Image (spheres, rainbow, N blue to C red):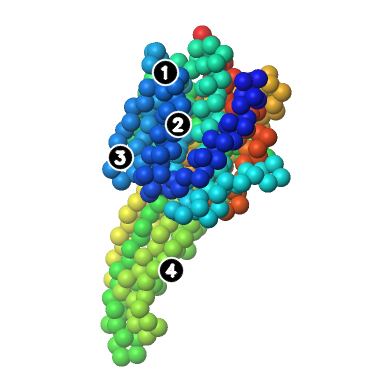
Amino acid sequence: MEYIKSNEQLMLQLIETLVNIDSGSYNKEGIDHVGQILSDEYEKMGFTIDRKHNKDHGDNLVIQHKDAGDTSILVIAHMDTVFPDGTAAERPFTIKDGRAYGPGVIDMQSSLVTLLYAVKALYEANDESYKNVTIILNSDEEIGSPTSRGLIEELSEGKQYALVMEPARANGAIVSARRGGGGYTLTVKGKAAHSGVAPEDGISAIEELAHKIVKLESLNDHANGIAINVGIIEGGAAPHMIPDEEIAELDVRIAKQEQAKVVEQQIEDICATPDVEGTELILEGGINRPPLELNKRNKQLLQTVKEVGASIGLTVKDVHTGGGSDASFPSALGVATIDGLGPVGGELHNENEYLEVDTLTERCALLAKLMSKLSEK
Ligand SMILES: [Zn+2]
């Protein structure tokens, strides 16, 4: 605790350094730079870095102490942000009235530093639980983890716990459940015709899609955490042309894994038969991200986090959220998982994103104590 408190300024300096590097999901150079800075710090403590090279994205890093045996804790943090190149120069790291600002400051450069200093604190205190940890720093969470999902799933094998470093919510709560989901593209084909000259020759793709939109939206069941949103429709050429093609894009969210098959079947059934004779429907996609469910295992881990919090004078609350994260993957594989272990902040993914500076050391201490507690034999 003392070590962490006395290093607050260094932590903030490192956050500043990381925030001021553009590291959007498609900026390989920036993410690799962030990864290098963190790797250097871990290497100083005898950690080894297994760099999983990526051609188009930043490298994913697997970090473990050289004397680590079979670790039981997987810690997951991402290095990419949602911000385009140039954002760091436009609005670099600043602190005002107890809040820090800058691209990715809370999602999740502050978490990367919180994690590093939690490990450093254990190392400095000769608490060997830092040898019980496998850390993955991935490069593509913000775009659905295309290159790192498999790696996370691979590393989940044999682990007892997964700690996910997404930020705590604005009210300080950690995250104990998230919805899963996926997406679909529905293409409708009809037959074009001039609506003045030969309307009887046309088959309207828009009319067909209109039927489907109403049916798909009727699947919404907010009480049970099921959300279907037809968020984009595209098509049509001119008011006097009967449209021959129309495309809709759907976002789907579920609260429980068992809902996935049911909802997928309902969507497929709706799109199996046209309402407008002569149209053709092509449905692509599916539910690909499992929810983070508050099952028995996860509840137990949540309880441990609350107890550890209480031991350092921190009342830990938890929330359920609709957004996705990498926490879903280990949890679906049977690893006890908790999310939102980063410091407190808000306004994620927009220019007002902020870190509550005074929560940095408290969350760092919580994480260090938690890793220590979970390593007790
Ligand atoms: Zn994030």
Q: Residues within 10 Å of mark 3 (few under 14, many from 20)?
A: some
Calculate the distance from the C-alpha at mark 4 to the C-alpha at mark 2.
Answer: 51 Å
Marks 2 and 1, the one that precedes in the sequence: 2
Residue type for callout 3: Asn
Under 8 Å from ligand 1: the CB of mark 4?
A: no
Calculate the distance from the C-alpha at mark 4 to the C-alpha at mark 3.
Answer: 42 Å
Marks 4 and 1, the one that precedes in the sequence: 1
Residue type for callout 2: Leu
Marks 4 and 2, the one that precedes in the sequence: 2
Task: Please report the residue visible at 65 percent of the width from the left and 28 percent of the height from the top.
Answer: 362
Give the numbered dot on residue 54.
3
Residue type for callout 1: Gly
Q: Secondary structure at mark 1?
A: loop
Calculate the distance from the C-alpha at mark 2 to the C-alpha at mark 3.
Answer: 18 Å
Residue 263: image location, x then y, percent: 43, 47
Q: Secondary structure at mark 4?
A: helix
Residue type for callout 4: Ala
| Residue corresponding to mark 2 | 38
Residue 282: image location, x then y, percent: 30, 60
Residue 233 placement: quadrant: bottom left
